[in-house]
Image: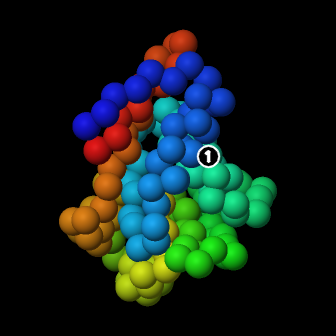
Amino acid sequence: MKNYFLKNIEEMYDLAGKVASNITGGEIYTFTGDLGTGKTTFVQGILKSLGAIGPFTSPTFTIVNQYDLNNKNIKTIYHIDAYRISSQDTDSIGFSDMINDSNSLILIEWPEQIQSSIPEYSKNISFSWHERGRFVMLQ
Ligand SMILES: Nc1ncnc2c1ncn2[C@@H]1O[C@H](COP(=O)(O)OP(=O)(O)OP(=O)(O)O)[C@@H](O)[C@H]1O
Ligand SMILES: [Mg+2]
C-alpha cells in the first residue's frame, strides 16, 4: 500500500502517469471512494498518459467508454462506471470478453456494484475527499 495526498488535478495526473507507465496490457484496475473523490479524474490521467484520444467523458450514463489505442500491448481501454448497474448486467456490456482479451486494459469505477464479476487479480486504487485535495491509496 502507498498513500498520497494530492493537492490538485495536476498532481492527480502525475501519479496517474506513474501508474500508467507500469501498465503492460491485461490489467484490471478498480477505483473506489465516495462521490466526487477523484476517480474519474485519475482515470482521465491514465487515458492521457497512454495516448488515448479524447474527449475523456465520464461514463456515468453510457456505463462503458471504449478507447482504441495504437499500442503494441494495449489495444483497447474500457472505462466502466458501474454505479448504475449490478452483476446481472455484466453480460449485456460484454464484460467477460473484455476480461478475456489480454490486450485490453479495464478501469472500473464503483466496482462494489459488480464485485462478484471482478477477478481476484484486479488492483485497487482508493480515494477520499479533503477540502484541500484528495487522499489516494495504491494497492
Ligand atoms: N486532487 C484533487 N484536488 C482537488 N480537486 C480534485 C482533485 N482531484 C479531482 N478533483 C475534483 O473533484 C471533483 C470530482 O472529481 P471526479 O469527477 O473525478 O470524482 P469521481 O470520484 O469520479 O466522482 P463520481 O463518484 O461522481 O464518479 C472534480 O471537480 C475534480 O476536478
Ligand atoms: Mg466518476
Task: Tell whether circle 1 marks a residue whose Cβ is less than 8 angstroms from ligand 1.
Answer: no
Which of the 4 quarters of the picture holds residue 112? Answer: bottom left
Residue 89 in sight in this render: no
Please identify the quadrant where the N terminus is shown: top left
Q: Is residue 22 above or below residue 17?
A: below
Measuring from the top left, give residue 124's x and y in whole percent.
33, 50
Q: How many marks?
A: 1
Residue appearing at x 46%, y 61% in the figure: 23
Nearest to the observer: residue 63 or residue 136 = 136
108 sits left or right of 8 in the view:
left
**Quick one: SS at disc 1?**
helix
Please identify the quadrant where the C terminus is shown: top left
Q: Which residue type carries mark 1?
A: Gly
Q: Is residue 17 above or below residue 83?
A: above
Nearest to the observer: residue 90 or residue 101 = 101
Q: Is residue 106 above or below residue 89?
A: above
Measuring from the top left, give residue 49's x and y in whole percent.
64, 52
Measuring from the top left, give residue 129's x and y in whole percent.
45, 24
Residue appearing at x 57%, y 45% in the figure: 17
57 sits left or right of 11 in the view:
right
Nearest to the observer: residue 3 or residue 87 = 3
91 sits left or right of 42 in the view:
left
Residue 15 in sight in this render: yes
Q: Is residue 80 above or below residue 39?
A: below
Residue appearing at x 47%, y 48% in the figure: 19
Residue appearing at x 69%, y 76% in the figure: 70
Q: Residues within 10 Å of mark 1 (few under 14, many from 20)?
A: many
Q: Which residue is mark 1?
A: 45
Which of the 4 quarters of the picture holds residue 13? Answer: top right
In this picture the colour scheme is: rainbow
